[in-house]
Amino acid sequence: MMTIASSPRQTRAASFADWLEVRLPKLVLAPSVLITLVFVYGFIAWTSILSFTRSKTIPKMEWAGVLQYAKVLGHERWHVAVHNLMIFGVLYVLICMVLGLLIAILLDQRIRHEGTLRAIFLYPMALSFIVTGTAWKWILNPGLGLEKLAHDWGWSSFHFDWIINEQMAIYTIVIAGVWQASGFVMAMFLAGLRGIDQDVIKAASMDGASLPLIYWRIIIPQLKPVFVSALVILTHLAIKSYELVVALTGAGPGYATELPSTFMYAHTFTRNQLGMGAASAVMMLLTVAAIMVPYLYSEVRGPRTSSH
Amino acid sequence: MSSKNWDSPQMVQGSANRWSRVIIYGLLIFFAAFYLMPLVVMLLTSFKPLSEVYAGNILKLPAHWTTASWVKAWGEACVGLSCDGIKGYFWNSIKMVVSAVGVSTFVGAMNGYILTKWRFKGDNLLFGLILFGCFIPFQIVLIPMAAFLGKAGLASSTSGLVFVHVVYGLCFTTLYFRNYYIAFPDELVKAAMIDGARFFRIFFRILLPCSGPIITVTVIWQFTNIWNDFLFGASFTTGDTAPITVALNNIVNTSTGEREYNVHMAAAMIAALPTLLVYVVGGRYFVRGLMAGSVKG
Amino acid sequence: MKKSFLLSAAVALVYSQIGTIQAATDKEVEVVHWWTSGGEATALKVLKDDMQKRGFGWKDSPIAGGGGDQARTVLRARVASGRPPEAMQMLGFNIQDYAEEGLLGNLDSIASKEGWDKVVPAPLSRFSKYNGHWVAAPVNIHRTNWIWANKEIFDKLKLTPPKTFDELVAVADKIRKAGYIPLAHGGQAWQEATIFDSAVLSAGGPKFYKQALIDLDPKALGSKTMEKAFAQMQKLRGMMDPNFSGRDWNVATSMVINGKAAMQIMGDWAKGEFLKAGKKPNVDFLCFQYPQTEGSFTFNSDQFAMFKVGDDQAAGQMQLASAIMDKGFQEKFNIAKGSIPARMDVSGDNFDACGKKSMADLKVALKNGSLLGSFAHGHAMPESVKSAVYDVVTKSFNNLQVTPAQSVQQLVKVVEDSK
């Protein structure tokens, strides 16, 4: 691919230019690679080393073996966090996908005001929970939000107090998380749907296949790359979710909505347990890597099948 | 980038029965209501006098519409000891976002161009390395990054914050452009080379003019992420240099006896407006860009 | 590419120049704090004005939220960057943690000149000093074993402040029957811990409190008395409305102010909110001790820790420390904030009834050895142990399925693990 057009009338200067031309792409790429090596991998290495030390208030290079890992794994709060991540992760990814696909299909039915509706479904992605946190807290709070609303409107038996219930609070996190991300998934599916060859579908409908059947048999299977991309994006978003929990519940009631990300943050920054924070961060990173590396591998191996 | 028939109708046959249309619209309206609720709550509250906020419910229309809260949030609300509203922090964020988005998008475009059109041995490995950076939890970089910024003399400055956002935005921008350019016909590039065009000329004259959709996607993505960032802003700035999210957090947690929820909501709306605007204006191109570049199988 | 990159770097550099020019005003002292609510901000303004009179600028770095959690994060980043602020609001053991790392400066010269040792009580200066050197200037003394009550409700129902826990239960019953919320509360771990402070003190007395929460004696921690404290706390939960999740402390206070709720168990910073709303002690609201803690005093003290900085900035720090320890400032500040002065030689004449009571009780408690650091506010045990105990307390409070006996078992375990 790297062919250099050479002409017989080359001067010295031109050959220097050619020399530069060959190396230019790598030179231009180099800063990005260097930055990544230092600020991503260097920092990961630093955190990993820290997780094997006794660091408490500030980093201290005093070897502690796997002590910090043992502490984290023996911590009741970490167990809650991991358990919550399972519930949250599975529901969040699943509901976002189903809802995103459903809305995308509905929007794809020659809808009036499609643009407006699309904007409505997409806008939550534009807002941080720092911005919408208070509104969400109100909506979920039984004394202020939906429950009060239903009572004001005369539906007095309506009950919605998950956010103050230890067992149910994690599901309110799912609701708000789905609200934010499902529109993005919808956009991905919509883009996928619009890219599908119309002729196949026309042929199928000529054969008398019903619409749901066409979707189920022909269209949805063709969206496989979108499913894969959405799965990867959502999974890593789920693991990284942090502001969501902080804004809605502050990991409460008690610590019923703790996630590994909030656990890590609290131990690193407010509990003077840098070592434990680092150990939990490494475990989170390993989880992310376990999901990401196979995906990245397939992504870069097949350069022609590009799928985000 | 084959069939970009965006507005092409899907397959609802002519005789589609009315009931299915009713169900489709019904569902869409139901979902739209769910998605809109937090925004409606914020908007309504921001236009109510405080007494109505405490008396009514969250979806009650204001009896007396007032913009006083907006005025107060913009110019008078107290952040710590200074009561100048959030306007200063708003401009901080604008400065930060414009520089960070510009630099990271441009560098991402160059990277994407090189990784697809000037391929070399090991380029995929490098791409994989860069890409993994998208997926790390950012909390782990806070302390080492703070140490670096301190040594580099960038601590507590807007430029330091811009640097951080460029560093951790690169992986996304590179990903987007790389996936977009990979579908760009190599023949065009080759033809240009034969005509004597060189590295930069090919990029600026041939690839860049065709990059509209992906630039839109990248800019929207970066703009939203950087504007909404709280973690980096809170950790790497102080006082007057803070971005708007940090100021908003301070306002919301600043309270006198009864909380001025209407002012909080107005401040939140002001903080949300730029990204909302970007999504509403650019949303159409966003889906189109996703389709053109990154999603298609 | 290179050119543009340089160009953007240049643009970035220009911004940074603007930034540093603004920041480098001479003789400025940066203060990081989380005092952003009404009463607190008013109080802090007094200090700002004082500093300006002394010829120093005040660079305000407020970081609100989470009772200082957010501010502590920022501090960590600032310390890592090698540019700590001159002064930082800190509590109890946190000061000691940073001093241990050798990050704090030395205030001995001004402390001995102004005779701080003579006026600051030892249980307090234990936190302001590290290895015998002053590293922080205490601003105030807060008391945490208070109950704040709406007088109108108490008068209407003909109630008097309960003297025992059983009386408190009876009072709460009557209030509930009259249609009010007996106890206002915000569902955040530190607020639950604040209640726990009082419950332990009430269930076991000052000696027990010290053995369990300060000396961390496993026998006391695992005792039946401790079970009683957990049982009390769970009973208190029954007196609250169900919507307390995530509510901030001052929102709960305003429920008492507005007559929605009758009482709140909270430190005396709550008084600042009453005063701000124009309410008067013993006229509109009552302040009394949590039952069976009369005579004891669980305290926390806001201090400004001074970081080690260059000599040119140290002058400003000394001035700030001196301004904080100034008698006049301590009086003005604490009247606004609701607390009492950290120095014992300030006259109580200008304080309100609650403040006067607090100052009198402090003297008695100091004599009897019942002036105790508050666990909830980081004055009883090191930060890492504290947060582990927080977990047990907040779990017990929020999950009534967990029996007091189980909590006590858990308590002994986590304290052992995190020591």
Image (cartoon, coloured by chain):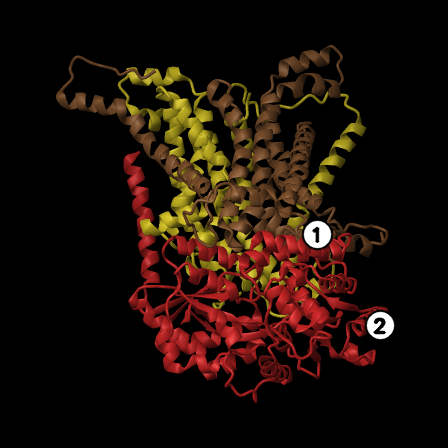
Chain colours: A brown, B yellow, C red
x 54%, y 38%: residue:
A283
Taking A110 as reference, is C346 above or below it?
below
What's the chain of the residue with tag 2?
C
Q: Residue furthest bottom?
A: C349
Q: Residue C182: give x, y in percent of width and height.
A: 78, 69
Taking C156 as reference, is B210 above or below it?
above
For mark 1, does the 10 Å Cα neighbourhood hold few (<14), some (14 to 19), or many (20 or more) residues?
many
Q: Residue furthest front?
A: C219
| Observer able to see residue C376 | no
Q: Identify which amino acid the numbered label 2 is placed on.
A: Lys
**Helix, strand or loop at disc 1?**
helix
Q: Residue B18: give x, y in percent of width and height.
A: 80, 28
Depth check: B237 or A297 in front?
A297
**Helix, strand or loop at disc 2?**
helix
Labels 2 and 1 in the same subunit: no
Depth check: A86 or B107 in front?
A86
Depth check: A22 or B194 in front?
A22
Q: Identify which amino acid the numbered label 1 is placed on.
A: Ile
What's the chain of the residue with tag 1?
A
Q: Quadrant of the N terminus of chain A?
A: top left
- Residue under label 1: A139
Depth check: B39 or C176 in front?
C176
- Residue under label 2: C174
Residue B257, quarter of picture: bottom right
